[in-house]
């Protein structure tokens, strides 16, 4: 079974609109962390936001927020007021078992912002 | 400050040759990771180093792949007898250790096996 599932291979959004990128995860651990990374066409991986499994509040970082629904095992990324520079691949990732720091990534969503 | 650096940025090699990829982590980061990203796909974990502990090699796809790290410094990923399916971008990342710390990624090495 996939540990991280991103069901939207591609999305097109009008500039200045909000967009939600979906991510569901599968783990039996009680303690885990969820990350979102952005990968522009240049290829670098840029960290956006982190949510810990015990965090009661949804994480926010500027225009990024994470809609964390623990019972549904979903961790959707919300980008408000989208900009042309938001066009990129977006990857959801999970770290299980804090004795091992490796990340498991989803297959990504390609977001294109339309002017 | 300096980020994670990787060299070379691009490597073209013939099938059957060995290649070495290098990663310089951020100074002070005790954890170092190697990932592979095939074209159009997500990242696959390869190997993880943490301080002087034994590395987690559970993601290495075959015994042709190996990696070393000396202390908390440079790491090299070696692929022996390269195959065409090894063509990918190899990404290195480093981090502090602990639940909330994100991994900082290097620019990657694009490996093409002809």
Image (cartoon, coloured by chain):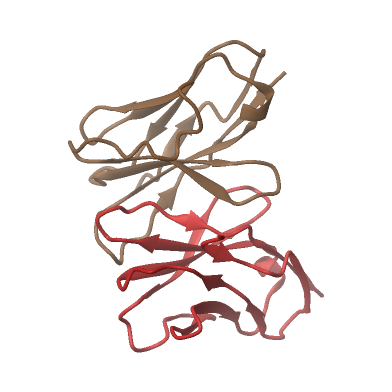
Chain colours: A red, B brown
Q: Nearer the viewer, residue B108 or A10?
A: A10
| Residue B94: percent from left, percent from top | 35, 46
Instruction: Say if B68 sits above or below A49 in the image.
Output: above
**Quarter the C terminus of chain A occupies:** bottom right
Q: Nearer the viewer, residue B112 or B86?
A: B86
Q: Nearer the viewer, residue B103 or B56?
A: B56
Instruction: Say if B12 sits above or below A41 in the image.
Output: above
| Residue A71: percent from left, percent from top | 45, 86
| Residue A47: percent from left, percent from top | 47, 62
In this picture, residue A101 sits left or right of residue B85: left
Instruction: Say if B59 sits above or below A16 in the image.
Output: above
**Quarter the N terminus of chain A occupies:** bottom right
Q: Is residue B26 visible?
A: no
Q: Is residue B113 visible?
A: yes
Residue at image position (20%, 32%) is B71
Q: Residue furthest left?
A: B52
| Residue A37: percent from left, percent from top | 52, 62
Instruction: Say if B12 sits above or below A77 in the image.
Output: above
Quarter of the figure with residue B87: top right
In this picture, residue A53 sits left or right of residue A7: left
Residue at image position (37%, 60%) is B102
Residue at image position (17%, 36%) is B52
In this picture, residue B96 sits left or right of residue A112: left
């Amino acid at each position: 079974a996939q540990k991280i599932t991103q069901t939207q291979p591609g999305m097109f959004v009008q500039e200045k609109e909000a967009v939600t990128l979906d991510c569901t995860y599968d783990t039996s651990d009680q303690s885990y962390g969820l990350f979102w990374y952005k990968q522009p066409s240049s290829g670098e991986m840029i960290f956006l936001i982190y949510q810990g499994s015990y965090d009661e509040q949804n994480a926010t970082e500027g225009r990024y927020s994470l809609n964390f629904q623990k019972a549904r095992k979903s961790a959707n990324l919300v980008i408000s007021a989208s900009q042309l520079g938001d066009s990129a691949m977006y990857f959801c990732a999970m770290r299980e078992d804090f004795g091992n720091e490796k990340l498991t990534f989803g297959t990504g969503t390609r977001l294109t912002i339309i002017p | 400050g300096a980020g994670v650096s990787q060299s070379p940025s691009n490597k073209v090699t013939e099938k059957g040759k060995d290649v070495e990829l290098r990663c310089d982590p951020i100074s002070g980061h005790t954890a170092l990771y190697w990932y592979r990203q095939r074209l159009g796909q997500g990242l696959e974990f390869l190997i993880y180093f943490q301080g002087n502990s034994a590395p987690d090699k559970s993601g290495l796809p075959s015994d042709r792949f190996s990696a070393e790290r000396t202390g908390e410094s440079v790491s090299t990923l070696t692929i022996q007898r390269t195959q065409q399916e090894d063509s990918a971008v190899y990404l290195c990342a480093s981090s502090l250790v602990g639940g909330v710390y994100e991994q900082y990624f290097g620019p990657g090495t694009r490996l093409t096996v002809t």
